[in-house]
Image (cartoon, grey):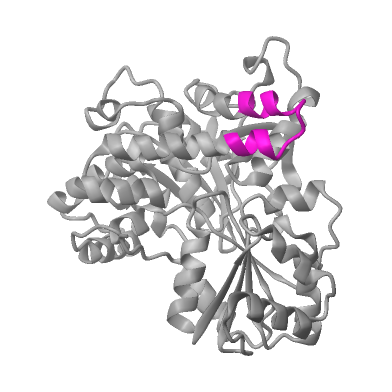
Amino acid sequence: MIKMKRKIYEDLLNWKQSSDRKPLLLQGARQVGKTYIVNLFGFNEYSNVAYFNFEQNEDLVDYFSVLDPDKIVKKLASHSKKEITKGNTLIIFDEIQYCPRALTSLKYFNEQANEYHIIATGSLLGIALNRESYSFPVGKVQFMTMYPMDFEEFLLAQNENYEFLIEEIKRCYKENEALPRPMHDEAMELYKTFLYVGGMPAAVEQFLKTKNLEMARIKQDEILESYFDDMSKYNKSTEIPKVKLVYKNISTQLAKENKKFKYSLIKKDGRAREFEDAIEWICLSGVAKQLYKLDQIKLPLSAFKSLDCFKFYINDVGLCCASYKAQYGDIFLDNDSFEFKGGLTENYVFNQLTMNKFDTYYWISKDSAKIDFITRIGKDIIPIEVKSSDNVRSKSLSVYVNKYKPTYSIRISTKNFGFENNIKSVPLYAVFCIK
């Protein structure tokens, strides 16, 4: 297996060392690498790991009939035939949503035996918590969300030594200095590869092992199929076809010039009421996320979002590419007839901003000027314009700037770093630098 460096590892270290550490709930869509990273973390940072998977072993449920932490640990130690000691053993509850009592037990671990270090993971945890009758340990756990690999992690996973390239990208981003042309061109080619492969660890590993893009696509198709299986297994029978219809429609609608998600494009005369549960399922499972329109540019931004107007983006740009059945030539040969280029680029940028913990929105003026992303960076509300090429002429950004006079703006495109006319130019490969 190819060793993959994940940034969330540092967050896990901070959790372990925190003076007010609580049991940790690590959320995220299926196959983003949760099980891999928590086991690696346990192996590196603890004397031993006690791993329990509630999806694979239904008998574990019986160990939580009594919610006394010491009694639970004694039973788990006997089951795993491992010594479980406070502070030295990492206890992993994988797919914890399959055992509601285990989820409830985290409250008692926090209150009565917080010396035990526990990480619980769940792929469909959001759905379970919102749709089932759980006694949830409110305020007694810490949450963390894991996403697919970002572009920086994709570079770090490769055999080639890209650490210097990454550091130069970060330096040029900070100093608004153009990256040397050969390095810029190389980074752009790597970015195109990432658009196709994406950041799902299984697809990345397959590509790095074989250097074959089509082998990565096979893995992506398998992941998409597993998502559809989840939609069938963990849903009401009446909702299954709706969930699948909505998910399949996301990439299709991103290919439209107006990327606002429209129910009428899912089916003729489709309405919000008909699909709202399906959309909720998709968002709670983590396989896609909504981007809402802002009615006003005021703080807090979340108070001024329009719940009726949103765009939809798939959780991984590679899966988005696979869902649309885009071919590598469409991306690598800059195919002018490839109408999905703009939507795919936006999906990539949205993924990167989400991974960097930004709450983002979009904006449209009365005269149809459009800003792809609006977010808060520090104390400032910053507009972010996205271009899939080096054609950066845009009336929309000028309209926004004249109306709201932001401290500065960000334009993401194939152009090199720079700062001109109060616009920070960020190459597409450097979106991970926006913090």
Residue 406, image x, y percentages: 54, 50
Residue 302 located within the stretch drawn in magenta: no
The residue located at (65%, 38%) in the rendering is 282
Please state if 47 lies on the left or on the right of 218 as rendered: right
Residue 243 located within the stretch drawn in magenta: yes
Residue 121, image x, y percentages: 62, 62
Answer yes or no: is residue 8 visible: no
Judging depth in this view, the residue of 128 and 313 nearest the camera is 128
Up the image or down, 127 lies above or below 73; here it is above
Answer yes or no: is residue 207 visible: yes
Residue 182, image x, y percentages: 13, 50
Residue 367, image x, y percentages: 60, 23
Q: Which residues are magenta?
A: 229-246
Quarter in which the N terminus is drawn: bottom left
Up the image or down, 103 lies above or below 118; here it is above
Q: Which residue extends farthest left? A: 182
Assign the magenta stretch its main secondary structure.
Answer: helix
Please state if 373 lies on the left or on the right of 264 as rendered: left
Up the image or down, 350 lies above or below 16; here it is above
Judging depth in this view, the residue of 204 and 48 nearest the camera is 48
Total numbered circles: 0
The residue located at (38%, 35%) in the rendering is 387
The residue located at (35%, 62%) in the rendering is 4
Up the image or down, 136 lies above or below 84; here it is above
Quarter of the figure with residue 72: bottom right
Judging depth in this view, the residue of 399 and 54 nearest the camera is 54
Judging depth in this view, the residue of 138 and 408 nearest the camera is 138
The residue located at (25%, 46%) in the rendering is 190
